[in-house]
Structure formats: structure tokens, C-alpha cells
Image (cartoon, rainbow, N blue to C red):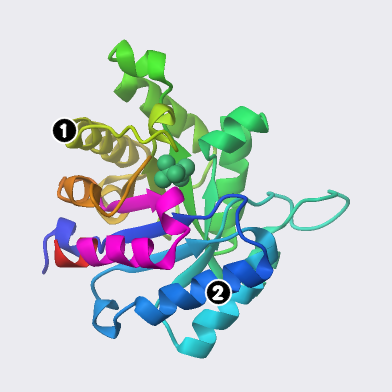
Amino acid sequence: MPSSVEARRPLVAANWKMNKTYSQGVNLAQGVCDRLERSWRTKVDVVMCPPFTVLRGVSNVIAFDRSFAQVGAQDCYWEPAGAFTGAISVEMLADLDCAWCIVGHSERRSLFGETSEQVARKVSALLAGKVTPIVCVGEPRDVYDAGDTCAYVVEQLLASLEGVPAPQGEVVVAYEPVWAIGSGLVATPEHAQVVASAIREAIARRFGEQAAQRDRVLYGGSVKPGNVGMFTSCPDVDGVLVGGASLDAESFCDLIKKVVDA
Ligand code: PGA
């Protein structure tokens, strides 16, 4: 039996945010698939999360190339169908081969007023629909400066999982310090490890030890090819969520190669 850490294959997820038109997104996905080496298939999970309008284009590129890359969404709504103008259901995502979905990203929380209670409803809907949630948590600068990160992040995570039944499938947690997102600032690996470990302990208390050993914890916030190694070398960091550096195929695949070679 491999140790539990070895069993958690690294996950590199690309958060394109509100970038790329359909044709630009298809080009980017094609550039990524062209550069992914077949031998990496067993060494890393790669997920591209484009805007909703590009999901079909990316999943077509992946299918045509028989690439091991996968497609994910950046948000969803918890109701299955009905009068919810502008919303996208889990079933709609799954129908586009979307196996992953980011929820509770700090931009959704701060710019769109999303609450942890709403995030929890989305997580439940995703798990019921067999789409793996990537639940984002992270502290603002003042909390970091006060040294209260772990307590803040664990509380935010538990609130974002409130009422979620013990899942059969994986729940990925992405730890992204709010002050590190898009700023060029990064946490130290020591800080990332301490928080990732606190997140894993919280998962163990919430869903049991088996889930805690299975579920991957990612670091996110200004991750680039040049700094990814210091995060993935942390024992409780199982991959990264990448914004800016995922918008260029060469830099994104350079980053993936660093994870594979680590
Ligand atoms: P960044 O974004 O890599 O551009 O900092 C990360 C994220 O928001 O997921």
C-alpha cells in the first residue's frame, strides 16, 4: 500500500476567471493539451476551469486529443432547474463533461456577496451530482497579520461544509490567502503547510480520518512556475490553484512540469 501522501496525486487546477472568449479559450486549451506529455497522466491531475461559455470548447479539445486534462467550472447554483435567471445547475455542468467545480472563491465572496451558507448548498449539490467541489477558503490581510489564520480558515471551511452529508467522493479544499491572490505576494511554504495541516485536521473531525487522507488540499495565490515547487514540497499541500499563470499555455505547462518533476 502506498502511504496516504503518495496516494494523493498532485492536482493542478487552472482558474481562468473572466478571461478568454470562446475562440481564445479553445486556443489556450489546445496549447495546453499539445504540451502535456502522455507520461504525466499518472503523475498529475490537470483541470482547466474556463468561463461557462468556453466549457464545451475545452471539453471538445480534450476529447478530440484524448488528453488526460479535465474540465471544471468556476461556480454553479444548487437548485436542479427552474426560474433562476442567469444560474447554471450541476446537471448542466456534468452534461458538458465537467467533473470539477470551484466554489466559494474569494472573488465570489467579496464581489458577489456569496456566503459560506450558500457555498455549503453548492457543495451538497455538486456531491449529489458527482461533480468534485474545489472549496476555496482564505484569510484577509489583517487576519494574517494578527496571526489568526488557522482559526479563521477552519471556521470558514466548516461553515462552507455546514449540513453537507459525509461524501462518498472527494472534496478538494483550496487554501488561498486573499492578500496573495493576483498580488504577486505569496505565503511562505511554512505558513502554507501549517494551514493545510489545520485544514486536513478539520476534514478529519468533520468527515473522518479516511476522508482527510483522501481529500486534496491545494495552495493558491500568485503561484507561478518559479515558486510552485516550494508549495508542492509541503507534505499537506497536494497541488495548486493557479489564476494568472494559467492564462498562457507555455507558462501553465512549465508549471505542471515542475510539479511532475518534483
Ligand atoms: P492568481 O489567482 O494565481 O492570479 O493569484 C489564484 C486564484 O484566484 O485562484
Which of pointers 1 and 2 lies earlier in the amino acid sequence? 2
Residue 216 visible here:
no
Magenta stretch prevailing secondary structure: helix
**Distance between the alpha carbons at the discs numbered 1 and 2:** 37 Å
Element marked by disc 1:
helix
Residue bounds of the magenta highlight: 238-258
Q: Is residue 247 magenta?
A: yes
The mark found on residue 13 in the picture is none
Q: Position of residue 186 (x, y in %)?
A: 30, 34
Three-letter amino acid code at the position of disc 1: Glu
Viewer-closest of 124 and 97: 97
Q: Position of residue 90 (x, y in %)?
A: 65, 60
Viewer-closest of 211 and 200: 200
Q: Position of residue 23 (x, y in %)?
A: 65, 72
Camera-side mark, 1 or 2: 2
Decide if ligand 1 comes within 8 Å of the CB at mark 1: no
109, above or below 79, in the image? above
20, above or below 162, in the image? below
Q: Is label 1 in contact with label 2 (beta carbons under 8 Å)?
A: no
Residue underneath mark 2: 27
Q: Position of residue 134 (x, y in %)?
A: 46, 50
Q: Is residue 30 left or right of residue 96?
A: left
Q: Quadrant of the N terminus?
A: bottom left
- Residue in the image at 17% along x and 58% along y: 4
Q: Is residue 182 magenta?
A: no
Quadrant of ligand 1 in image: top left
140, above or below 56, in the image? above
Residue 47 in which image quadrant: bottom left
Three-letter amino acid code at the position of disc 2: Asn
Instruction: Tell me if mark 1 has few (under 14), some (14-19) or many (20+) residues whose alpha carbon lies within 10 angstroms of its own.
Output: few
The mark found on residue 190 in the picture is 1
